[in-house]
Amino acid sequence: MISLTSPVETRAHHWPAGAKLAALCAATVVLFAQESLGFHAVVFAACVCVYRLPGVRFFRAGMKGLMVLWPFIALVLVWHLVIGAPVAGLVVGLRLLSAVALANLVTMTTKLSAMIEVVRWLATPLRRVGVNTRALEIGIALVVRFTPTLADKGAQLAQSWSARSRKKPGWKIVMPFTVLALDDAEYVAEALKARGGLNQ
Amino acid sequence: MERNLALVALFAALIAALGLIPKFTLGFGVPITAQSLGIMLCGTVLGARRGALAVLLFLLLVALGLPLLAGGRGGLGVFVSPTAGFLVGWPVAAFVTGLVVEKWRRAPLAFVAGVASVIGGILVLYMFGVAGLAITLKKSGAEAALLVTAFVPGDIVKAVLAGMITAALAKARPESVLSRA
């Protein structure tokens, strides 16, 4: 399954995922604590530079990820212009851009397997006290495995709808879609049990 | 145990798959998709605990970097964006929706599931969503609430659909509607 990790290999791809996540947490806390326009302008400029370092392809993908924020930024700027506090509006807008840019940066430079390893590590204290975290690991694997399968079945339902009706398939296919998911779940449960279940 | 895990995982996958059904966006970048219908169904079909777990598992995979949110979004960035409050509210919404269906057994399931979806999937969810908007955009609660009122009619339609679909599922697969098991 396609993840949001960038195919452009950067140096940050090889840094430990846990360290990147911890740094991201710290950076986000600092971003939300600071109120100075100069600080936020410098941080955002630095973010843009960091995105540019690995090349044009990485830069474009990164900027595309930030484009979803434009309605919010526009809204905040107009709002703050109307109430006569444009500097505060710029601070909110820049903070938002930097926070999302930094978070996306971690996602773009960390492989799914490395992220799952961090989740496993975070669950260590649970295992120590006797909680079975295998269910979580199998659950992650099952979702990754079944999302494309279900999406495919959904597309087939939409096609068979289109073959019978002139109208576009809408909410009415959600019910049979859910039945398919429920039936698959029963088969998967049987298969898991047949392979020894969760308590191995 | 295995059955619970399979249902939780398959419903998490169902939420993801519903996000792939073509969407339409109504201003402010909040996509209106079948995905939030999936959140309601998690509660009405799986019940409070399993429904919330399915949504949590789905969100975990989004955070790990899979593009499972409507419009192919995902990764850690969505959890600091203005709509993050809605994501945080999703598991709570599924839990409350499920809880209402589990506890209120005297009315027809379609009606109960619809009302439960309004309580969990709209009232509870919007409290979180509005708080998220207020924090990230530095607005007051009332101002933030104003921004999302446009989405309430669409969500009421979804709650009605969730009620009808749940009742239909209870007929097709009575043993699988665990909120009433």
Image (cartoon, coloured by chain):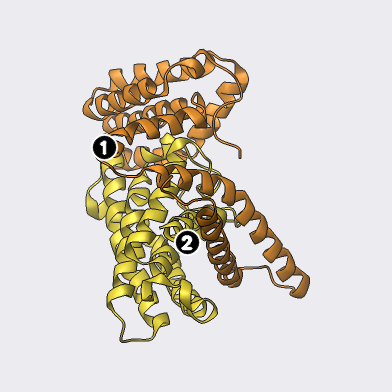
Quarter of the image for residue A60 reads top right
The local crowd at label 2, few if under 14, some if 14 to 19, many if 20 or more residues have their Cα within 10 Å, is: many
Chain colored orange: A
- Residue with the mark numbered 2: B38
Q: Chain of mark 2?
A: B
Residue A8: x %, y % from top left: 60, 21
Residue A41: % across, % down: 35, 20
For residue A75, what is the image quadrant? top left
Q: Nearer the viewer, mark 2 or mark 1?
A: 2
Q: Chain drawn yellow, letter? A: B
Q: Is residue A24 left or right of residue B18?
A: left
Regarding mark 1 in the picture, which secondary structure is present there?
loop
Q: Chain of mark 1?
A: A
Asked whether the beta carbons under mark 2 and mark 1 sit within 8 Å of each other, the answer is: no
* Residue A93 or residue B175, whichever sits in front: B175
Where's residue A200, x and y in %? 43, 44
B114 lies left or right of A174: left
**Badge 1 is on which residue?**
A84
The reply to whether residue A29 is in sight is: yes
Query: What amino acid does circle 2 point to?
Result: Gly
- Label 2 residue SS: helix
Amino acid type at mark 1:
Gly
Q: Please state the horizontal and vertical placement of residue B114, each as a whole percent of the image.
A: 39, 75
Q: Is residue A149 left or right of residue B164?
A: right
Q: In the image, what residue occupies the spot 53% across and 13% down?
A: A53
In the image shown, does B44 or B141 lie closer to the viewer?
A: B44
Q: Is residue B33 at least partly visible in the picture?
A: no
In the image, taking residue A113 as reference, residue B141 lies left or right, namely left
